[in-house]
Amino acid sequence: MPGPESATPLQAASGGVSGAAREPLIRARGLTKKFGTFVAVDAIDFDVAPGEAFGFLGPNGAGKTSTMRMIGAVSPRSGGDLSVLGTDPDKNGASIRARLGVVPQLDTLDTELTVLENLLIYGRYFDLSYAEARSRAMELLEFVQLNDRASSLVEPLSGGMKRRLTIARSLINEPDLLLLDEPTTGLDPQARHLVWDRLYRLKQRGTTLVLTTHYMDEAEQLCDRLVVMDKAKIVAEGSPRSLIEQYSTKEVLELRFPVGVQETLDGQLDGLGERVEKLPDRVLIYAADGEDVAAAAHERGLRPETSLVRRSSLEDVFLRLTGRSLIE
Amino acid sequence: MTGSAVTHVLPFGSRHSVHILERNRFIFRRGWMVIFSGFFEPLFYLLGIGFGLGSLIGTVAGPDGSQIPYAVFVAPALLATASMNGAVYDSTNMFFRLRYEKAYDGMLATPLNVGDIALGEVVWALGRGALYGLGFLAVMFAMGLVPSGMGIFALPASMLIGFATAAAGLVAVTFMRSWQDLDLLFVVTLPLFLFSGTFFPITTYPEPLRTIVEFSPLYRGVDLVRAMTTGVIGFTQLIDVLYLFAMGLLFVFIASRRMGKMLLK
């Protein structure tokens, strides 16, 4: 529990109006997590500023969840330094958690309780009065559009509804910092857009968001700044736009050839665009102008089944950085 | 900072444990009928064995050696057993929460610590054991099976048994991996029930068996409750109390360490 002694440095760290040089809300240096001999997070450095929406982008197993758990003060680090809200999560875990909202990768809803009870008791865990917890719970149920399900048990809810309830639950203590681990994985597009919309509103209100995702569109939509993680390390850092500018071209031409044809194209693609990437099912050609390259390919006598010009995305950045696609 | 640092290193729980009781009360409000099973089980044993079999047995030697009716001898032991069973039964719920439900993971994302959860769950189980105990004790009084006015202290005694056995049950479930493993709990509680001085005095046992039985937690509980209902109270009961209290504390400590290892990786 946050003692009176710890309140002062914590409040100072939250920035707010006064902070001239705004201290980062999270600061990691050489942060490392090992499970036995397996290195899940390998000496990573990053800062998250107040009010920022910060993302960890990477494939499954890149170390995103381990990082989030260390930030969330539920997993002791194996090495390096970590400061969250101005203090050490391994020493002052309870006082940090009191000011965090957490949306874990797998829902940890209390399935023995109803939707409303989940929010009420969660408020109690944060020492809110029942009256306060109830008024916040009603507001939050409205915010995530679950007010008509208040007295339902958790189990019959759809995946999207559970996710929204988890988000509502994470906001019951009006957190200074919201941690979202794969907030929309497993949701259908409609549910995903609703969650994005709610997160976007929180961002507008100035809540600091830290999220992990392996969806590039999610990272592009929500993150002001992100780091790309691969094999326990950070391989790039920047805003979605600057990462795309730095590691990719403006446009991408995607060519799909009839089965068996792609393997016979040796050499025929050379010199097209700035870079050619061959995936099992298609060829990506990176160029400033995709239509130009499409025309040049046609002149060379290439006859793809489909041809598509699109803007570069974080997926392309990831492919460039790691040589692999983000979602297998 | 000292405050949170202390709760961090002392895994015995804090005032936050109360929230676990509040949580369980939400569930209990919907499922309060289950307490009947815990109430009727000892009652049936009392009718079948205490009175039924007791009519063949007549009297046995009570705690002070004097002859008492068999039902008076057996009833306090059934009370102690009901407290143990209620507490152990509750630990199967904790198994579900620990292995499948992930609700504890959700709790640990809040200011709650593993010690808070362990203590809260054990105190809840203790309260449930007390509820069983209260109902059964009322039946004992009504049937005239409590010769001593000290019998009301059988209630706190049964809570102490609930505390010790709930904590042990929680430790046990942290080692279990499947529902089948839970059967092992009954491999332990059934012989405890049958051989802890419940149905016959432990003077029946030859040494060293008798000494071994004296170390059984249920024996300590039976001895304590029987002393209260019969009013034969002495130094041994101090040992009973200390034994059960120390056992409860030790196992809450172990349980929160185990839960920390499982949940805070």
Image (spheres, rainbow, N blue to C red):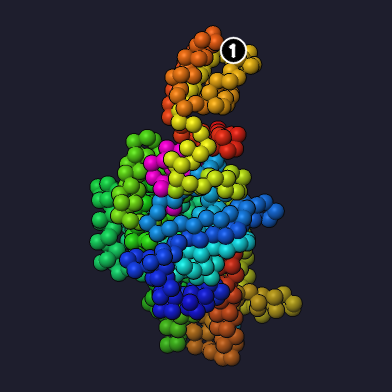
Residue at figure coordinates x 35%, y 48% from the top left: A199
* Chain designation of label 1: A
Whether residue B132 appears in this view of the structure is no
Residue B11 versus residue B185: which sits nearer the camera?
A: B11
Q: In this view, does B54 lie above or below B181?
A: below
A185 in the magenta segment = no
> Helix, strand, or loop for circle 1?
loop
A213 in the magenta segment = yes
State the extent of the magenta-drawn residues as a range. Answer: A209-224
Residue at figure coordinates x 62%, y 45% from the top left: A231
When asked about the image quadrant of residue A278, the answer is: top right
State the quadrant of the C terminus of chain A. top right
Tell me if B33 is positioned left or right of A67 in this view: left
Whether residue A117 appears in this view of the structure is yes
Tell me if A164 is positioned left or right of A258 in this view: left
Residue at figure coordinates x 43%, y 73% from the top left: A9
Q: In this view, does A110 lie above or below A277?
A: below
Q: How crowded is mark 1: few (under 14 residues within 10 Å), some or many (20 or more)?
A: few
Q: Name the residue under label 1.
A: A261
Q: What residue type is labelled 1?
A: Val
> Residue B6, how many percent across, how many down?
52, 77
